[in-house]
Structure formats: structure tokens, C-alpha cells
Image (tube, rainbow, N blue to C red):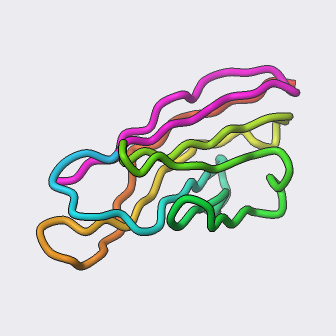
Amino acid sequence: QVQLVESGGGLVQAGGSLRLSCAASGSILGINLMGWYRQAPGKQRELVADIIGSSATRYADSVKGRFTISRDNDKNTVYLQMSSLGPEDTAVYYCSAEIASGMWVYTPYWGPGTQVTVSS
């Protein structure tokens, strides 16, 4: 069994910062892509940022220059440092990872999500 658990969400004022963490646990052979998605009320889930290895990153245009994704491969953990937050960043943030468990086939897993609310 593999689990992803997010932490670090909460309520923050506009202009503030938050750091999200997502730890993968269970029977893990390897992790390929790790990323963060978000879903605001009434909207589709969208990619925020993802990372392959330790440095190959991709960001949504709306968060470039404000958010930074990183990962600690020893801890099977991915982070999302969010700065200059605005009300438009309010959403449930989901962690996703492609994980090989039991055999060397990568399967996507999702965390349950963590709420980020930015007040104006």
C-alpha cells in the first residue's frame, strides 16, 4: 500500500506565504514525477507545479515567480513554497506522484488534499 499525505495548508492573508509538504509512504521502489495540483470551487483541477528528479521543474504561468517546488528523495517528500499569495490561490491543493510499488511500473497516486484559503 502506498499513501500520500499533504500538510501545511491553512488560512493566510493576501501577500503571505505558506509551505505545503507531501510525504509518500508504504512499499515504494521508486518515485518518478511528483507534483501539486489545485482545484478551486466550481473549477477544474489544474497543475500548479511538478518536478522530476531534483531539478527539472514545470510551473503554471499563474504561479511562476511566486511558487517553488522542491523534493527530498531520501524522505520521499515534495514541497511547495508559496509566496505573494492572493485570493485567486484559494483552493484545495492535491499532491500527486508516480510511484513504483511491488514492481517497476509507475502508477499515479493522489493525496486527499489540503485546503489553502487566502483572505483579502
Foreground: 102 or 15? 102
- Image: 65 above or below 9: below
Residue 9 horizontal/vertical position (percent): 57, 29
Residue 21 horizontal/vertical position (percent): 50, 37
Q: Residue at x 73, y 21 (%)?
A: 12
Q: Is residue 22 visible?
A: yes
Q: Residue at x 29, y 64 (%)?
A: 30
Q: Residue at x 66, y 64 (%)?
A: 57
Does 54 lie within the magenta span?
no
Direction from residue 89 to residue 32 in the image, left or right: left
State how many labels appear: 0
Direction from residue 74 to residue 120 in the image, left or right: right
Residue 67 horizontal/vertical position (percent): 75, 46
Instruction: Assign the magenta stretch its main secondary structure.
Output: strand
Q: Is residue 45 visible?
A: no
Foreground: 58 or 74? 74
Residue 13 horizontal/vertical position (percent): 81, 20
In which quadrant of the rendered image does the C terminus lie?
top right
Foreground: 17 or 12? 17
Q: Quadrant of residue 23?
A: top left
Q: Residue furthest bottom?
A: 105
Span colored in magenta:
1-23
- Image: 42 above or below 88: below
